[in-house]
Amino acid sequence: MKKYPLILDCDPGVDDVFAILLAHSTPEIDLKVICSVSGNAGIEKTTYNAQLIAGLLGAKTIIAEGASRPLIKEAPPIGTVHGTDGLGGYAKGFGEDRLAPISSMKALDVYRKILLESEEPVYIAAVGPLTNLAILFLAYPEVKSKIAAVSIMGGGIRRGNITPYSEYNFYKDPEAADIVMKSGVKLLLCGLDVTQKATLSEKEMKSLKESQNEFSDFSVKILSSYIAKDAAIHDPCAILALTNPEKFIYEDQYVEIDTREGITRGMSYVDNRKNQEKKPNCRVFYDMDLDFFRKSMLDALEHEASKKPDENKSPNDQ
Ligand code: RIB
Ligand code: CA
């Protein structure tokens, strides 16, 4: 039995690719399903991209299509650093011949099935807008008792990236973030405070360029356009916060979400007034060991590069 049975909820998304890579290559993780959500691109594209990445990696997992739009209100139009296809323009040209299979069930019901049938509590890493999780908690609150923890890439206490106060995932669906923040489930919040630090140095990029395998070629290409606009590889932090919390600095705090429109849409803020009665509702991550982050990424990429060429063929190819 692996230590971390995991559901990965994402909106691939260039940095989501490296969360999928880590979830796939970490021996202690049993990647049960990848659920897509609309975010960095529309649901058709993020679902296809999840199938493509899992297929490229030869990940023995399924893809389940999630929510196609935010819970209540669409976000005002905002640019994307991920390209119109969600992968910097490289969603075509790699791995179309071996897409990972897609479930006949939607993400909501795959979540419910996995959680209710699991003999042990399940971990969730959510690295896109939290729409799927909010719907799950509203529709099937009974599944909360089967969740070990939800590790979220989202929010930011000291900064935003879409506005000075709001981070992309929470800006896209503030009501979903609010529902999850109030869910009572154990939450790890890897916001911009820590993920802005998650960059690759020349050393990692050089190793990537020298790896000469399909996934590293794909990684170099999707990073080439992304890094110039957003140097941080945000999403893998949510995986590492689960498996290696000792490499991070964090504090248990009471966090609220602003669901009003305007410059604070989706803002996540801490209420740490002395006399406030509210107990902490999440573990907020503020810093991490950058060398550890970079080594984790390099190890995962080198693990991928070390595979024999046909190791990543999908089952129906073998
Ligand atoms: O703000 C960064 C987050 O928004 C990351 O998850 C990125 O993939 C985008 O979804
Ligand atoms: Ca993402």
Image (cartoon, rainbow, N blue to C red):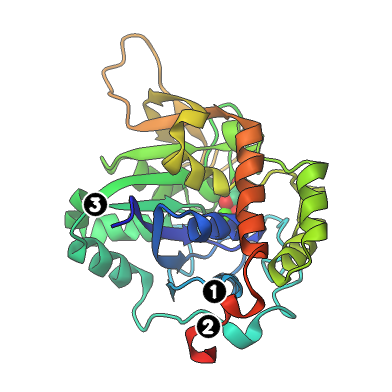
Against 105, residue 164 (above or below) is above
Residue 173 in the figure: left or right of residue 278: right
Nearer the observer, 209 or 85? 209
Quarter residue 291 falls in = top right
Residue at the image position 39 percent from the left and 13 percent from the top: 273
Q: CA distance from mark 1 to mark 2?
A: 6 Å
Q: Which residue is denoted by mark 1 in the rendering?
A: 58
**Which quadrant, please, contains the N terminus?**
bottom left
Q: Residues within 10 Å of mark 1 (few under 14, many from 20)?
A: many
Amino acid on which the number 2 mark rests in the picture? Ser
Mark 1 secondary-structure assignment: loop
Image location (x, y in percent) of residue 295:
64, 42
Q: Are marks 3 and 1 in contact (CB under 8 Å)?
A: no
Sequence-wise, which precedes: disc 1 or disc 2? 1
Mark 3 secondary-structure assignment: loop
Q: Nearest to the eye among marks 3 and 1: give it.
A: 1
Q: Which residue is denoted by mark 2 in the rendering?
A: 314
Image mark for residue 121: 3
Amino acid on which the number 1 mark rests in the picture? Gly
Residue at the image position 73 percent from the left and 43 percent from the top: 200
Q: CA distance from mark 3 to mark 1?
A: 26 Å
Sequence-wise, which precedes: disc 3 or disc 1? 1
